[in-house]
Amino acid sequence: MPIRPFRPRPLPAVTPRWRAALLSALVAGAAACGSSGASGSGGGTPTGPGSAQQGDSVNLSGTYALASYTVDSTDGGVSSTTVDANDGGTLTLTTTNYSIAWTGTFAGGSSPAGTYLAIDTSATADRGTLTLTNTSPSRVMQGLYSLASDTLRIQLPDTNNGSVDGTEVTVWIKQ
């Protein structure tokens, strides 16, 4: 089988669907940075990062600024969108809710909002699964989060017409 040459994948258009996916990733990251909860239950009051045990729901409450956005495609390509003072976003997380406000090239449609659930899956680090439930349009996204200090990293599936094309990776810095 011949090896295909690398072809950079164009960045996705900023559509409501794309924003919802990015928002879901952000919410997942925010969930990893929160506080207080029921040990090992995955339910009850979310636990703060650093004190969460494996299986706990995690409260990632806070305001986060987008630091980077990258798409790793299934064919091995990688593409990034520049994040700077004019182009980016703000992720706001409460104990259970999230909202994203976009600026510049990330703006251009609705701002995603809804609920999130972050579950710690590691016995030694602040990381785990993230479920984002967007309210409009109604959509559930599942991904991964990790939190180190004030840096929240969210990985969500990059979908195109219902098929997974890779992974969207966003990095957020707590303000």
Image (cartoon, rainbow, N blue to C red):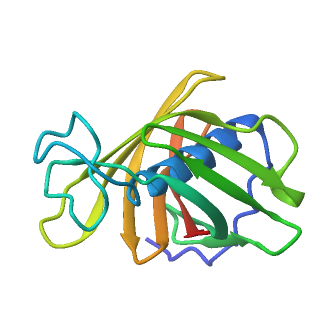
| Residue 162 falls left or right of residue 85 | left
Residue nearest the viewer, comparing 62 with 105: 62
| Viewport quadrant of the C terminus | bottom right
* The image quarter in which residue 110 lies: top right
Q: Which residue lies at the image location 38% right of the left edge and 57% below the top edge?
A: 32
Q: On the picture, is 153 further left or further right than 52?
A: right
What count of labels does the image hold?
0
Percent position of residue 143, x then y = 40, 49
Could you say where residue 44 lies in the image, as x and y percent from the top left? 22, 33
Q: Is residue 165 visible?
A: no
Observer-nearest residue: 52 or 16?
52
The quarter in which the N terminus is drawn is bottom left
99 relative to 70, above or below: above
Residue occupying the far front of the picture: 36
The residue lying toward the viewer, choosing from 128 and 81, is 128
Q: Which residue is found at the position 37% from the left and 66% from the top?
A: 146
Q: Residue at x 19, y 40 (%)?
A: 42
Instruction: Locate residue 160: give its quadrant.
Output: top right
Q: In the visual, does 168 lie left or right of 53?
A: right
Q: Work out whether residue 75 or residue 70 is closer to the camera in this orientation and state it.
A: 70
Q: Is residue 117 visible?
A: yes
Left/right placement of residue 82 relative to residue 160 reads right
x, y percent for residue 48: 31, 57
x, y percent for residue 94: 50, 44
For residue 90, which quarter of the picture? bottom right
Residue located at (42% from left, 54% from top): 60
Q: Is residue 164 above or below residue 84?
A: above
